[in-house]
Amino acid sequence: MAITQGHSIACCDRNRRGGIKRIWLIEQGNLGAVAYAAGGEINSFVTSSAYEFEFDRGTAGYSANATRENGSTLVNVELEFYVPKITEEINARLRELTESCGVYAVVESFADDCDDTDPETYFFVLGYDKVFETKAYLEFASGEQSTGVGLQDANGTAVKLAGVQAEYPREILTTTGNAVMTAGATTIAAWSIA
């Protein structure tokens, strides 16, 4: 692979937003076909069981830290979010997460494409790449649960999922009609009580 072009920073890129807006998790084994667009983005990521995991505002984000050794690049990916309140229903979902055999995450960022008339946010896939494919999955890394000790203390669980990929996360094109949560997938708010 070679460098094919440079990168310029637009004015609206300086007014970017951080954080994650929404997270969907897909358990390994429930992923169907994956297809790529000419630019390298994912334009089809098919599943029938994607579960939305809601979290406290301002607590979710991911990091992708790359290192290179012996000519190979590895990217350590971590996804963090905070689930408020401790209940049996929430702990049941956390137990499922700790016992899963790996997950893929689709995250929607707050950053948008700078289109003033119809801004679109970005969706990225964590735990799947072109090199390792399904073997790049994320696993439960940690969960710190606390009731706090005072009336106004935080009550909930900080969850961290982690994995190793061979490349930085790829974006899903949402304009193709095959976007993860707009077609071909069932979105279930996994934290809500039915």
Image: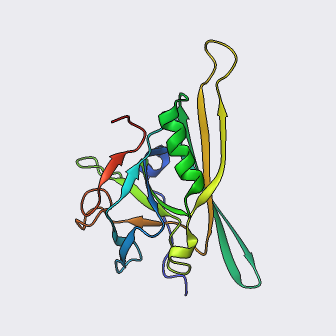
Question: x and y percent of residue 96 in the render?
Answer: 53, 50
Judged from this view, the residue extending furthest toward the top is 151
Question: x and y percent of residue 36 in the render?
Answer: 37, 78
Residue under the image location 22 percent in, 65 percent down: 177
Residue under the image location 77 percent in, 84 percent down: 70
Judged from this view, the residue extending furthest toward the bottom is 1
Judged from this view, the residue extending furthest toward the right is 70
Quadrant where the image shows the C terminus: top left
Question: x and y percent of residue 79 in the render?
Answer: 57, 52
- In this image, 55 relative to 122: left or right? right
**Residue 144 higher or lower than 167, as above or below:** above
The front one of 114 and 57 is: 57
Question: x and y percent of residue 111 in the render?
Answer: 43, 48
Residue under the image location 49 percent in, 47 percent down: 14
Q: How many marks?
A: 0
**Residue 2 higher or lower than 77, as above or below:** below
The front one of 59 and 99 is: 99
The front one of 98 and 144 is: 98
- In this image, 101 relative to 52: left or right? right
- In this image, 108 relative to 176: left or right? right
Q: Could one spot residue 173 in this view of the protein?
A: yes
Q: Could one spot residue 112 in this view of the protein?
A: no
**In this figure, which colouring scheme has been used for the structure?**
rainbow
- In this image, 68 relative to 36: left or right? right
